[in-house]
Image (spheres, grey):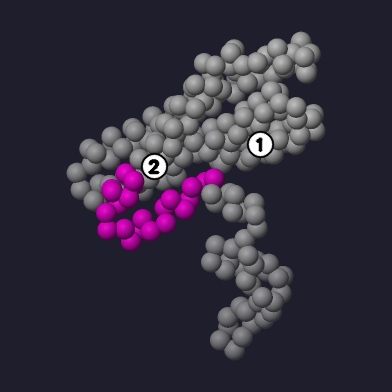
Amino acid sequence: DQVIMVGAMPYQGPYSLTMTSRLVPTQSIVKPPKFWQHLYLMGMATWLKLGDADAEDTKAQANNEQVNVSLVAALFLTVTSSYLISVDEFDWDFALAKWGSASTFIWHETLMALALITSILHVLSTLVSVVILMINGELGSEAEAAQFQKMMGLRQSLGYQFLMVGVSLTGLMFSIHVAVFSYAGFWSLIASMVVFAVATAISLLYTLL
């Protein structure tokens, strides 16, 4: 068995040698991407680079990407910062009666920490995108813009990756909130936390790569 590349996807399997000395796999080489591969490509933001080589206005395309990221991050920031300010005003008497004093303290601190972390991530996402927009504004020609994008690489998508982690943690925060301040059972809380913890771990992996 040999490993050959078909586009961006590796193919490992039996092959045969044709009359023209070409390797031809004896099995079908069309393999649909797996779910985790879709998640990886989405999180790494490689799709933001599609068409850059053929773009007529690289600078405008990059600006549109950063504007969209900064706007979404700013919208989430308004939600998470408002939540952070209002944490102490929630119905903690209900939570105390449902969970007890020790668990209620843990939930309070957890929600406070998540609100703070998500707010910071959304601030970083907004700042990174705005700084890149400012740099693009100083670039005089299309050649300079193309060179800057080539130099930055996927680091130009750092604002998007901050946003993705922040959105995952925001979802985790609200899932805990619903479980703490509603009549939802313990296992519904565990299921929600597992789902959003996995999403957060994947997003963190994308950011650290």
Residue depicted at 62% across the width and 28% down the height: 173
Give the residue at x 67% y 35%.
197
Looking at the image, which residue is at 79% across and 29% down? 186
Q: Is mark 1 on a helix, strand or loop?
A: helix
Q: Which residue is drawn at 58% across and 16% down?
A: 87
Residues 131 and 108: in front is: 108
Q: In this view, which residue lies farthest toward the left?
A: 140
Tell me where the magenta segment starts and ends, as one range: 43-64
Provide residue 177's location: percent of width, then percent of height: 65, 26
The residue that disc 2 covers is 68
Q: Which mark is residue 3?
A: none
Q: In this view, does 168 lie above or below 60?
A: above
Separation (CA) of disc 1 from disc 2: 24 Å
Q: Where is residue 8 in the image (x, y as percent from the top left)?
A: 55, 62
Q: Which amino acid type corresponds to the residue marked 2 in the rendered image?
A: Asn
Tell me which label, 1 or 2, sits earlier in the chain: 2
Q: In this view, does 151 lie above or below 163?
A: below
- Residue, disc 1: 196
